[in-house]
Amino acid sequence: MNDDNPIKRWTAKRKAAVVMDIFKGKITVAEVARQYDLTVSEVEGWIDEAQRNMENGFKARPKDIREQYESELRETKEALGEAHLQIYALKKFKRLLDEDENS
């Protein structure tokens, strides 16, 4: 990135890309600070935040997926139960009609 078009707003996506480059050893904290006119403590804050959220990401994602599947399973079981009751009621109604016709 050149000095003619400096970054005016650091989005989460941009911060994540810079932090990943630091984690991968492609660039140092000091180089990032110098290149983008940031303080070292700002960049270190991004790293700290990324590390905190990384653990939460590993914990939350499987739980969220599991909860989603459990919810879908409950809904499917309810729909199956309703369909079973409808079939049962229709069969019983048909038997009653057959009995009336045979009487």
Image (tube, rainbow, N blue to C red):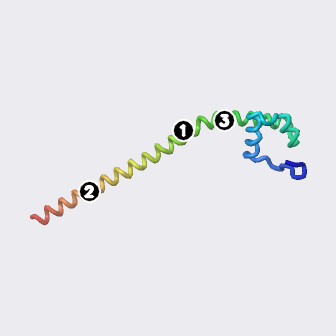
Q: Residue furthest bottom?
A: 101
Q: Position of residue 91 (x, y in %)?
A: 23, 57
* Left or right of 62, for residue 42: right
Label 2: how many Cα within 10 Å (few below 14, some 14–19, many 20+): few
Q: At 70% from the left edge and 33% from the top edge, which residue is drawn?
A: 51
Q: Position of residue 36 (x, y in %)?
A: 86, 43
User: Which mark sits nearer the N-terminus, 3 or 1?
Assistant: 3
Q: Position of residue 97 (x, y in %)?
A: 18, 63
Which is in the foreground here, disc 2 or disc 3? 3
Vertical order, 70 against 91 (above or below): above
- Between 14 and 25, the one lying in front of the other is 25
Q: Are marks 2 and 3 in contact (CB under 8 Å)?
A: no
User: Which residue carries the number 1 mark?
Assistant: 63
Q: At 83% from the left edge and 38% from the top edge, which residue is drawn?
A: 32
- Between 2 and 59, the one lying in front of the other is 2
At label 2, the amino acid type is Ala
At label 1, the amino acid type is Lys
Vertical order, 37 against 89 (above or below): above
* Left or right of 88, for residue 61: right
Secondary structure at numbered mark 1: helix
Give me the C-alpha separation between circle 1 and circle 2.
39 Å
At label 3, the amino acid type is Met
Q: At 46% from the left edge and 47% from the top edge, which residue is drawn?
A: 72
Give me the C-alpha separation between circle 2 and circle 3.
53 Å
Vertical order, 91 against 25 (above or below): below
User: Which residue carries the number 2 mark?
Assistant: 89
